[in-house]
């Protein structure tokens, strides 16, 4: 199943529209179409209106003229998902790959290629998974990272702002996802975070390349409820920036100036009437003294899965603090806490 209401913000400036997938009726069954909306919640417009195809996981091109997405023809016996590109002005679409299981396109910052996930199945089992690139005209397919032993899967690929590295998720069996980074050619793969018992997924680089936003939730018997986290790639400090006890927060994306995050909020069950018209995750566990409220984007109708697009302001220039949720294992690491105190002390002495 594809995660719906995946969002992508405009990295190149301009009107900074957010592109996402949704159904016209709000009932998350059947094909989805692509929409764009202003960060203020106004100007929602439909980009595709196709009865014969489901479109999901959209990603703006750097020049904002095209949207890459994963699509599948409705009624296709193989239910094949491939990578497509849509001209946002004319509505013309073209297919780049035929799948049958190609997902999660992400444009290289210079627009030269599109990174995506390809899954190979034997029956219902995953036989292999790889990250690959393809040119916007459909040529030049090239695998970058491949996992072929059937022990797990890789996905959630994301380009670094300079196009020299990629971040992705490696998930094995019941262990949950782990964050990895590799060079653009697939070499020098390394794990970013040792976070046993947690599902770390959906990583996205900040525009300046310093932070990695991702979704994380504790592994449990039922559905995993994720928060939005940040990792400072310079200091190694990790903590939550958006949290909700009932909503599953997924797929963070940065605003072009790096001051806001857009993410999808998904209620596990249908909420009571009139509840959760605004999503209120905390948005300042890494920035001291500020607790920001995220606001719902647009007028997405209440649906069976009750998904919303939310945005979390990230105040600039705030002091880094110890992450709020001290129950988490690595937050209790004494050397890390001592390091945080030293950072705070040095910053206070500079004032």
Image: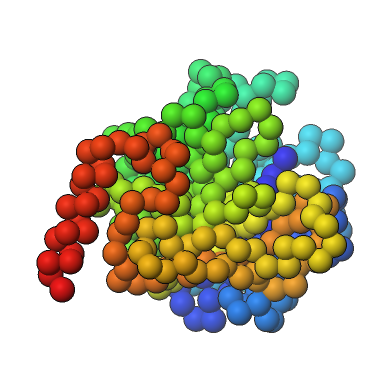
Q: What x and y, as percent, mark residue 249?
A: 60, 52
Residue in front for this viewpoint, 12 or 99 = 12
Q: Is residue 60 visible?
A: no
Work out whether 125 lies above or below 183: above
In this rendering, position of residue 217 left or right of residue 341: right
Taking the spot 36% from the left edge, 41% from the top edge, the residue there is 331
Looking at the image, residue 273 lies above or below residue 119 = below
For the residue pair 250 and 274, the one nearer the viewer reads as 274
Q: Which of the 4 image quarters holds residue 22?
A: bottom right
Q: How is the image coloured?
A: rainbow
Q: Is residue 272 left or right of residue 66?
A: right
Quadrant position of the C terminus in the picture: bottom left
Q: How many marks?
A: 0
Picture quadrant where residue 302 is located? bottom right
Split into 4 quadrants, where in the image is the N terminus?
top right
Q: Residue at x 21, y 44 (%)?
A: 338
From what the image shows, is residue 302 above or below residue 223? below
- Residue 59: give x, y in percent of width and height: 57, 60
Residue at position x 33%, y 51% in the image: 322
Expressed as whole percent of the image width and height from the top left, the position of residue 225 reads: 62, 43
Residue at image position (42%, 58%) is: 285
Task: Provide residue 292's location: percent of width, then percent of height.
Answer: 50, 69
- Residue 318 seen in this snapshot: yes
């Amino acid at each position: 199943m594809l995660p719906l209401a995946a969002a992508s913000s405009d990295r190149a400036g301009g009107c900074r529209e957010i592109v996402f997938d949704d159904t016209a009726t709000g009932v998350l069954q059947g094909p989805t179409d692509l929409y764009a909306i202003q960060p203020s919640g106004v100007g929602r417009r439909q980009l595709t209106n196709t009865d014969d195809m489901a479109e999901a996981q959209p990603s703006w091109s750097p020049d904002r003229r095209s949207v890459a997405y994963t699509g599948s023809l409705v009624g296709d016996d193989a239910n094949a998902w491939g990578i497509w590109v849509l001209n946002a002005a004319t509505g013309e679409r073209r297919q780049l790959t035929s799948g049958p299981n190609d997902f999660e396109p992400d444009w290289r910052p210079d627009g030269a290629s599109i990174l995506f996930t390809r899954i190979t199945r034997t029956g219902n089992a995953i036989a292999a998974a790889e990250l690959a690139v393809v040119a916007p005209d459909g040529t030049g397919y090239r695998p970058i990272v491949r996992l072929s032993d059937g022990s797990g899967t890789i996905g959630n690929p994301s380009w670094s702002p300079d196009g020299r590295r990629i971040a992705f998720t490696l998930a094995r069996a019941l262990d949950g996802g782990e964050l990895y980074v590799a060079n653009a050619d697939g070499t020098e793969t390394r794990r970013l975070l040792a976070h046993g018992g947690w599902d770390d997924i959906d990583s996205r680089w900040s525009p300046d390349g310093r932070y990695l936003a991702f979704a994380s939730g504790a592994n449990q018997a039922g559905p995993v409820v994720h928060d939005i986290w940040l990792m400072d790639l310079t200091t190694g400090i990790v903590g939550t920036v958006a949290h909700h006890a009932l909503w599953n927060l997924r797929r963070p994306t940065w605003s072009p100036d790096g001051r806001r995050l857009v993410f999808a909020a998904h209620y596990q069950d249908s909420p009571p009437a009139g509840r959760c018209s605004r999503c209120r995750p905390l948005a300042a566990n890494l920035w001291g003294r500020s607790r920001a409220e995220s606001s719902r984007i647009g007028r997405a109708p209440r649906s069976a899965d009750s998904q919303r697009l939310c945005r979390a302001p990230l105040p600039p220039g705030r002091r880094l603090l110890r992450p709020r949720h001290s129950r988490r294992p690595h937050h209790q690491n004494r050397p890390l806490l001592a390091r945080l105190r030293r950072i705070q002390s040095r910053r206070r002495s500079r004032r």
